[in-house]
Image: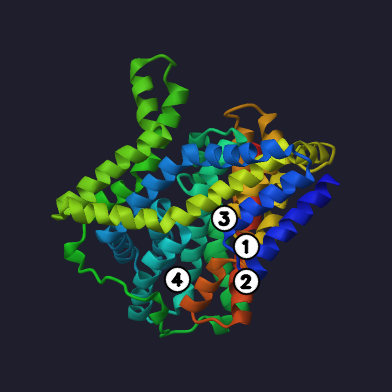
């Protein structure tokens, strides 16, 4: 019965989102209420459970998510993203152009969400593809794979940050292990997949495409953009601060004043705030922008993520109902008596939800609530908990299709038919998710 209730709830959620076209946040909250009733949670306690789920999820995440979005917007509006991409491409040349695209996408992807990163990077590689007489798809595959990996694996992106909190993992551990896992995953899902897709399905590698669907895009003159070094430093500063704090926590004694200061600066909330203030100076004031213009960019960025924050809160409500209703413990116990490793179980549950729900964030959040007891048995800050976060992230990108916004963005931007998009993009997300799982399982043998 517990699993049947979950299946009914998920089916209802899919029905409301896909068939009724009801807002995802509203659908999540409605589903959470109905599942709470079916799980016989006392009626008087249901509102408290919902509020606890939403508040507990957003209380910590809203600061990181909000500051991260503002940082990304400032880097983009100043032309910093354009400078990063064009400089790398110029340095690497035609032979290593895919490597340049991967590095540019990775750096930009650390500060921007998948959809936003796609809009920022795509016009740049479109120009490069035209100049080098290359098919846009040849550069688009490694770009999209890299942006997807950073979105799924690496804080401060919303899903991995939220999952880290739910599973009780250390954010620094997730970041460091995530960067390590990202490298082979991107190689397999980027250049390697690109090679075989080009051999087996060359018709999608067309030249001189029209990407008017991008809409208005600000053209930058290279000399009016920030320098390459300061652009990279600004985009990556949160990652640098968190990573340094994590490393110092291992090599410096606890209670050491220097270590305590570093841990304060490298705490996610503080790191994001410091990085944002740094971006205000480097991407704003040093570019002769007025504070009013800088503030407008920040407001715009928050408006873009407002609904995403609510969706994450709705996912938290759904998760809390599953926990309070005993479903989470039931599923954990069920998998505890199987031969599946916690990493495989985390990936499998998330992948199934991803196919059903479309949203990588919602599927990851829902899965994290189900597997939380399995992760907690390893103890706080354990490496296994961090690897389970990455397994959930890998599963959350599996099988992107018609219920995923990214599916339609790729179709329109690359001028693909529906069939071509299924073959090229849906297969890519499957390869990426499986490569991520294999990488995490190999890493589990050494940590």
- 150 sits left or right of 130 in the view: right
Q: Residue 440 is drawn in which quadrant?
A: top right
Q: On residue 446, which mark appears? A: none
Q: Nearer the viewer, mark 3 or mark 4?
A: 3
Question: How far apart are the alpha carbons under marks 2 and 1?
Answer: 8 Å
Q: Which residue is mark 3?
A: 25
Q: Position of residue 299 (x, y in %)?
A: 32, 54
Farthest residue in the left direction? 288
Residue 71's place in the image compared with 124, above or below, is above
Which label sits on residue 402?
Answer: 2
Question: Depth-wise, is mark 4 or mark 2 nearer the camera?
Answer: 2
Element carrying mark 2 = loop
Tag 3 and tag 1, C-beta contact below 8 Å = no
Figure quadrant of residue 36 = top right
Is residue 415 in view?
Answer: yes
In the picture, the disc for residue 139 is 4
Q: Earlier in the sequence, mark 1 or mark 4?
A: 4
Q: Nearer the viewer, mark 3 or mark 1?
A: 3
C-beta proximity under 8 Å, tags 2 and 1: yes
* Residue labelled with disc 1: 358
Between the residue at mark 3 and the residue at mark 1, the CA separation in whole angstroms equals 14 Å
Q: Is residue 370 above or below residue 308?
A: above
Is disc 3 in contact with disc 4, using a CB cutoff of under 8 Å? no
* Residue 216 image position (x, y, % from top left): 32, 74
Question: Mark 4 or mark 2: which comes first in sequence?
Answer: 4
The secondary element bearing badge 4 is classed as helix
Q: Marks 1 and 4: CB-CB under 8 Å?
A: no
305 lies left or right of 159: left
In the image, 251 versus 19, the foreground residue is: 19
């Amino acid at each position: 019965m517990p699993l049947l209730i979950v299946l009914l709830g998920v089916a209802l959620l899919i029905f409301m989102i896909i068939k009724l076209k009801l807002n995802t946040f509203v659908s999540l909250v409605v589903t959470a209420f109905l599942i709470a009733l079916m799980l016989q949670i006392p009626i008087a306690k249901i509102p408290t459970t919902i509020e606890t789920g939403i508040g507990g999820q957003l209380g910590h995440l809203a600061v990181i998510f909000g500051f991260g979005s503002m940082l990304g917007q400032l880097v983009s509006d100043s032309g910093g993203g354009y400078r990063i991409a064009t400089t790398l491409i110029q340095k690497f040349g035609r032979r290593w152009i895919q490597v340049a695209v991967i590095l540019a996408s990775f750096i930009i992807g650390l500060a921007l969400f998948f959809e936003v990163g796609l809009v920022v990077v795509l016009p740049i590689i479109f120009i490069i593809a035209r100049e080098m007489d290359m098919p846009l798809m040849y550069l688009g595959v490694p770009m999209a794979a890299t942006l997807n990996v950073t979105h799924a694996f690496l804080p401060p992106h919303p899903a991995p940050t939220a999952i880290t909190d739910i599973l009780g993992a250390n954010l620094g551990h997730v970041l460091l292990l995530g960067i390590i896992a990202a490298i082979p995953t991107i190689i397999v899902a980027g250049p390697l997949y690109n090679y075989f897709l080009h051999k087996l399905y060359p018709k999608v590698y067309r030249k001189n495409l029209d990407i008017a669907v991008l809409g208005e895009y600000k053209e930058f003159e290279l000399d009016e953009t920030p320098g390459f070094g300061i652009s990279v430093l600004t985009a990556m500063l949160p990652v640098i601060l968190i990573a340094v704090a994590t490393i110092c926590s291992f090599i410096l004694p606890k209670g050491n004043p220097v270590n305590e200061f570093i841990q304060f600066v490298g705490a996610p909330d503080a790191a994001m705030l410091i990085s944002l203030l740094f971006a205000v100076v480097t991407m704003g004031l040093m570019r002769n922008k007025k504070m009013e213009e800088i503030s407008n960019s920040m407001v715009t960025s928050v408006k873009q993520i407002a609904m995403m924050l609510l969706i994450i809160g709705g996912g938290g409500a759904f998760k809390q109902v599953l926990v309070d209703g005993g479903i989470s413990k039931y599923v954990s116990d069920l998998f505890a008596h199987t031969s599946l490793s916690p990493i495989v179980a985390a990936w499998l549950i998330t992948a199934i939800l991803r196919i059903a729900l479309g949203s990588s964030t919602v599927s990851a959040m829902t899965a994290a609530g189900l597997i939380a007891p399995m992760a907690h048995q390893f103890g706080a800050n354990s490496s296994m908990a961090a690897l389970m976060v990455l397994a959930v992230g890998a599963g959350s990108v599996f099988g992107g299709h018609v219920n995923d916004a990214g599916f339609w963005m790729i179709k329109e931007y690359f001028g693909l038919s529906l069939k071509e998009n299924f073959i090229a993009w849906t297969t890519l997300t499957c390869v990426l998710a499986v490569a991520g799982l294999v990488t995490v399982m190999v890493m589990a043998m050494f940590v």
